Image (cartoon, rainbow, N blue to C red):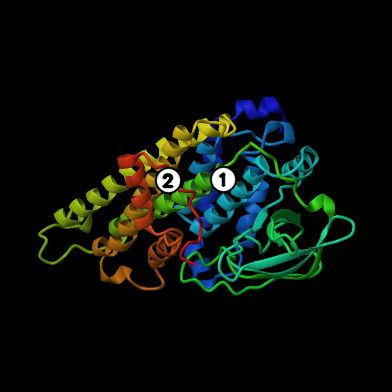
Amino acid sequence: MSVTENKSKSAADYVGIASELARRFAEDAAERDKQGGTPKTQRDWIRESGLLKLTLPVEYGGDGQPWSVALRIVREFAATDSAVAHLYGYHLAILANFNRVGSPEQKKRYLSGTAEHNWFWGNTANARGESKLLGKRSTDGGYLLNGTKKFTTGTPDSDRVLVYFQDEATLETKHGVLHRERQGVTVHDDWNGFGQRQTGSGTVTFRDVEIAPEEVLETQEGYGDGYNPPLTQSILTGIYLGIGLGALEAARSYIHNRSLPYALSGVESASQDPYILRSYGELWTSLKGAESLVDRASEQLDRLAAAGYRVSDEERAETAALVTAANVLAGKASLEAANRIFELTGTRSATTDRGLDRFWRNVRIHTLHNPVDYKLRNIGDWALNGTPPPTPVAGLHT
């Protein structure tokens, strides 16, 4: 796609592509959620759509779109298939790491390669818990990797993998890029969470895996520091909100097409039951309120991205608080919606063949990434005392 063509495409055009993909995801999303595994077909549809290069700079062959557009697409996907939304969102977050790591030559190689070949990126960057990966320095400047990484979202069926490891001698954190099928890399199909079952968030083991000097990413100074945490939190927020909106839409369809009016309601259809109307209105209001704050936080993220995150400490703190507040509100609203839709749809909706339970399971497991109490404490400390929120750590409750 040329630069001219990029400029001719509006945000609505990209969201339209995502909406059509989401419609296709929905055809078997509930069944695939039960099966687990890897959504290979759906990942290939995204590859074919061109959306994998959405946020890449135009100079590398990307579309140069702002994060607000990307986050809107994550939300669109999550409404029908939150696992696929998770995979897509993390792909974009991984690419954003090249704002702070990678020499100019490395950035060109990997970002241009992504745009040209539609590489889908996977993640082996978790540094918490039992995830331990050490690299022994080779004489040529590369490393020999041995160890384990857990919660490796998106690694199955990935084309390239971002890997964090520690230098065995200095314990310094290093970043590198590997092909998923590199000799010695084993991707285990052992993710057994009750939600997000097709994210491939299991274990990857490394046994004498060679990483060449040019695959070890150089660290850039002074650019993008602190940018990835609010971006990752924003992606998670988009997934939460999408799930909640998807749950409410699934309930709306079920109420109109399957629910029967309560015997004592005095109405002819469930959609006219006054208590269903009140509860549906309450959930809709809560989600729409969260959506407004999420959009505001996304716009703030756009401003920081445009500035290369070279902003004042006050702006950085305000962004962190705003992103965190949106994350909390979206998580709470979606958890409530995914739980309470059964009160609106009735007993017959609570069967495994309907698949409505997946919305609650998916948002419940996902909102455990960071404890809400700590998020609210941090927001309160900033709002009351002016204390900048600390950098959020994904997977704090792993």
Residue 90 appears in the rendering: yes
Question: Is 325 situated left or right of 198 in this image?
Answer: left
Local crowd at mark 1 within 10 Å, few (<14), some, or many (≥20)? Answer: some
The answer to whether the residues at label 1 and label 2 have Cβ atoms under 8 Å apart is no
Dividing the picture into quarters, in which one does residue 288 lie?
A: top left
Identity of the amino acid at label 1? Answer: Asn
Disc sitting over residue 228 in the figure: 1
Q: Name which residue lies at 38% across and 67% down.
A: 357
Residue 45 lies, in percent from the top left, at 63, 52
Q: Residue furthest right?
A: 140
Alpha carbon distance from label 1 to label 2: 15 Å
Place of residue 256 in the rendered image (x, y in percent of width and height, measured from the top left): 29, 56
Q: In the displayed structure, does residue 130 sit left or right of residue 2?
A: left
- The residue wearing badge 2 is 389
Q: Residues within 10 Å of mark 2 (few under 14, many from 20)?
A: many
Q: Position of residue 246 (x, y in %)?
A: 40, 53
Q: Which element is circle 1 on?
A: helix
Q: Amino acid at mark 2?
A: Pro
* Mark nearer the N terminus (1 vs 2): 1
Residue 213, image x, y percentages: 84, 53
Provide the secondary structure element on which disc 2 rests: loop
